[in-house]
Image (cartoon, grey):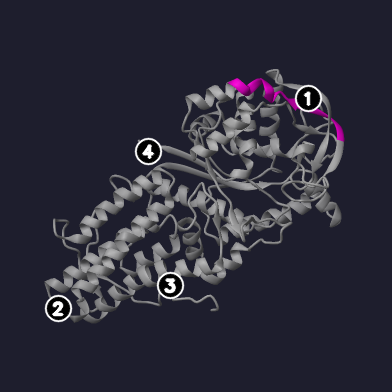
Amino acid sequence: MHDRFFLTTPIYYVNDAPHLGTAYSTVNADVLARWHRLIGDDCWFLTGTDEHGLKNARAAEERGLTPQEWVDQTSRRYVGSWAALDISNDDFIRTTEHRHTLSVQRFMQAIHDNGYMHKGLYEGWYCVSCEAYYPESDLFEGRLCPVHERPVEWLTEENWFFELSRFEQTLVDWYDSHPDAIFPDSRRNEALGIIKGGLQDISITRTSIDWGVRVPWDSAHVFYVWYDALVNYITAIGYGQDPERFAKWWPAAHHLLGKDIIRFHCVWWPAMCLAAGIDPPAHYIVHGWLLVGGEKMSKTRLNQIDPVELAADIGVDALRYHLVRDVVLGSDGDFTYEGLIARYNSDLANNLGNLFARVAAVVASKCGGTGPAPRPAAPGVRLSEVAAEVVLACRDAWQRFAAHEALEATWRLVRAANSELETAEPWKLPPGPALDAALGDALEALRIVAVLVSPVMPGAAAEIWKRIGLAGRPDEPGAAGENGSLAWGSYPGNLPVMKGAPLFPRRSVDS
């Protein structure tokens, strides 16, 4: 029986355009979802947009639009960007959808009915860009938001409060009994540090704006945007509307998120779930920031990079490969265009692209364009031995959320195949068994590589698959499973091999 894997990204606030930082998060979620499909898991992959809150209401007013008109425009930017980056999400949720309103109201009503809310007066320094209150001790000099470095505003309003303070020990106990709930361990320690440092009750509603989900037991209030947004994860799998579907997917929940929103996801959200009478999410995967010049990308710092423009320049698969290969999931990474080009040339143009080009050229010149079959796996058939080691290493790396290690392992097979060609020199051999062995083994290595890289470079993997004459696709569900197609010897031979244009033409920084 296959496992279930419900994977979510953060939902992105639509007042900002998609940038390379949000693309980094979404691409990493996508490659995880694709890998789990590849090993045969029943996978559901969710992303979407966060559309309520004061920031969007003000942005709409400035443009002479209603909030709904404004978020309809801005949400489309994310749909288009993720399509351009070959993101394979199964669902795209918008917090302005009717299904979400129903789930938020039913979830929050459960928390209220269970006795974890009270009404009170809230005063504090508020950052509109963050949609969050800050204690004065956290502000920069001049009362500037510590994230956006913009002036905060003093707000006073009647709110409903969620009694988060009642969950300190409960959350500590839950994390103690689920030691692997947060990856990596350093982020688990961070979440526990927040909890053990003392939790305060938190304001969850607003009366100062109308743009939000209405509180069902007090119509003068709308829910604060963060609490509305967090509920998206359960809306999409039927909370309050389809109990059977919810019961199927919620135990398999994996939230992928950036390190800057740990407090909301790993402290507030599990407490809210417990208060509503459901289990916390099973697992969190916390990634670092993709930095530019040592700083996190943001609109206020004017250091955003458009991922769609970058993909149009370098290629979608090349960009996806660089984002996954060069940044360890869980750690920060620093993006440079020079680094992107260097990785492109070394791994894609000089190694994988060169391997395919050499094989296709010799098959065309020596075999009439028809690829021979590989030798059976046996001691002394070096590529079969390397392939077996690489497949095991890849499965282990993906299990540990180390996609960069899986790619590094895959390129061991690419380099070994190139090395074997250089030793055999098939371009000098006459037709016969030695030629067929060298080319057949290389074609089989390319077949296995196409399967292994398909979560990260789906387009390039499919192109290699097609050019070596295979039907179907390398990313068929279950292809990397125990009974899939990664065992050595599955390339049947006697198939047409097409040369075509270079898979990855060499690039320079200036080209």
Which numbered disc, 2 or 3, marks the residue closer to the eye? 3
Do tag 2 and tag 3 residues touch (Cβ < 8 Å)?
no
Q: Nearer the viewer, residue 344 or 431?
A: 344
Q: Amino acid at mark 2?
A: Pro
Tell me the CA gap for discs 1 and 4.
42 Å
Q: Which residues are magenta?
A: 156-169
Tell me the CA gap for discs 1 and 3.
59 Å
Tell me the CA gap for discs 2 and 3.
29 Å
Q: Earlier in the sequence, mark 1 or mark 2?
A: 1
Which percent across, then down, holds residue 378?
Answer: 14, 56
Which residue appears farthest toward the front when viewing the image? Answer: 141
Q: Amino acid at mark 4?
A: His
Tell me the CA gap for discs 2 and 4.
46 Å
Q: Amino acid at mark 1?
A: Trp
Which numbered disc, 1 or 3, marks the residue closer to the eye? 3
Residue behind mark 4: 2
Q: Quadrant of residue 50?
A: top right
Residue at 76% from the left image edge and 51% from the top image edge: 149
Q: Amino acid at mark 3?
A: Phe
Which numbered disc, 1 or 2, marks the residue closer to the eye? 2
Tag 2 secondary structure: loop
Residue behind mark 1: 217
The local crowd at label 1, few if under 14, some if 14 to 19, many if 20 or more residues have their Cα within 10 Å, is few
Q: Earlier in the sequence, mark 1 or mark 3?
A: 1
The local crowd at label 2, few if under 14, some if 14 to 19, many if 20 or more residues have their Cα within 10 Å, is few
Q: Quadrant of the N terminus?
A: top left
> Does residue 16 appear left or right of residue 221 in this picture?
left
Q: Which labelled disc corresponds to residue 431? A: 2
Residue at 86% from the left image edge and 32% from the top image edge: 157
Which numbered disc, 3 or 4, marks the residue closer to the eye? 3
Which percent across, then down, holds residue 140?
Answer: 77, 46
